[in-house]
Amino acid sequence: MNPEHPAAIRVLIADDEAELRAALADLITSEDSLELVGTARDAGEVVELARANQPDVALVDVKMPGGGATATRGILERSPRTRVIALSAYEDRSTVMEMLGAGAAGYLVKGTSPEEIVQAITRVVSGQTSVSSEVMGSVVHELSVQLRKETQHSEELRVRRERIERAVAGEGFSLVYQPIWELATHRIVGNEALARFSADPVRGPDVWFAEAAELGLIVQLELFAIGSALTDLSRLPLDTYVSLNLSHRTAMSPELLDVVAGIDRGRLVFEITEHEEVEDYVALVEALARLREGGGRVAIDDAGAGFASLRHTLRLAPDIIKLDISITAGIDADRARRALARALITFADEMAMTIVAEGIETQAELDALLALGVGYGQGFFLARPAPLP
Ligand code: C2E
Ligand code: MG
Ligand code: MG
């Protein structure tokens, strides 16, 4: 500390331009009210000097090696009382916002007069923000642009939320059913419930469910779809099951047990349709065990695609493995697909699981699957999804 001026403001300088560094150092040294505690050329140096010296103020060049914003965050982390003033050659808006966002208390454009620099230092120490007038216009402009963007974004969110909420209320929502066949006997054993949305924008159910997931409404939407399917149960042949699509979030939700309460679980298959990675397998396995009580069965949807990896299948130990259409399509003409299917079939046999092939579109695919020993299947060739009569 300067012995003649015990209350001098202790200043650290960081700039990669030697000339500027020297000029600033001269300025600080020549001022009685200021004391120079060090000079640095890059982010690493200034953070280290700040840690060691705990200065009152750090003048930080925004474009030095390592970056001004990184330096600012580092300084504030290691010397929280230090007030950072950004120094920039130009009033580039995004840099201004970045530096202020990183915690800078002031922003000076290089070329500011020495008096103004000293003033700015004094001001930030007394707790005021110090932004040169050239920069202020940019800040205000940037804030207004951001505000407009945020308003737009929240308006979009509102529209998206509302259309999911309308679907959850049943508006524009319906179900179709696609029969699942025992391939050898050509007998229908179950029906997969598939959602249809007639509201704008026109798009597939997977997109609607993905949007609901993004907005945190997936459980509500899936529970609504499942509830609707359960009310159709009495209109489906008694000796068939209904296959319900649901994400692991819904499978783990306590409300699901309320929705299926009082239903003959022997007629229910819960198809775990994954669009995201499962974080907590222990909790999911426990939830599936509860769904299995009373004869409920669990299927892995889209096996061989997306998140339905072999590891996923192994961990959930389902009753049914649904071979994804990407494996079924063209299986009659493709050895690799047949090999993959054969591996899954062997695995399923070994584990006493059932295979359902999805997306059978041709007689040739059906024959190939039968030859491989696949027991069950669905697809446009057998029957398209359709509303209940
Ligand atoms: P998914 O569960 O794998 O359903 C099978 C999809 O394949 C259905 O598409 C079905 O219409 C279609 N499909 C059936 N046979 C064939 C075929 O031979 N060829 C081809 N190319 N496609 C066939 P959809 O109905 O458009 O549903 C797409 C996905 O949306 C579903 O895939 C499922 O992930 C999701 N989804 C549909 N309804 C629901 C629902 O109620 N709840 C949840 N959580 N997801 C649903
Ligand atoms: Mg499915
Ligand atoms: Mg599928």
Image (tube, rainbow, N blue to C red):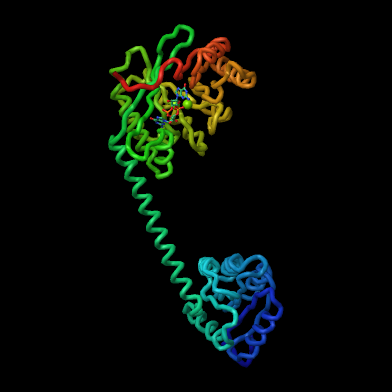
Q: Where is residue 300 in the image (x, y as percent from the top left)?
A: 49, 26
Look at the picture and state if 277 lies above or below 101.
above
Residue under the point 64% across and 18% down: 335
Left or right? Give the position of 294 relative to 66: left
Q: Is residue 295 visible?
A: no
Above-or-below relation of 323 to 170: above
| Vertical position of residue 300 compared to residue 179: above or below | below
Residue at left 65%, top 72%? 46
- Residue 187, image x, y percentages: 41, 9
Q: Residue at x 34, y 41 (%)?
A: 164
Q: Position of residue 274 (x, y in %)?
A: 48, 33
Q: Classify the position of ligand 1 by quadrant: top left, top right, bottom left or bottom right.
A: top left
Left or right: 137 in relation to 23:
left
Q: Quadrant of residue 31 in the image?
A: bottom right
Task: Farthest residue to the right: give it.
Answer: 18
Quadrant of residue 346 in the image? top right
The image position of residue 316, as x and y in percent, is 51, 27
Picture residue at 42% right of the left edge, 25% below the top = 270
Give the quadrant of the C terminus. Answer: top left
Report whether residue 368 is seen: yes
Position of 247 with respect to 89 (left or right) is left
> As rendered, which of 113 and 375 lies closer to the eye?
113
In the image, residue 358 above or below residue 86:
above
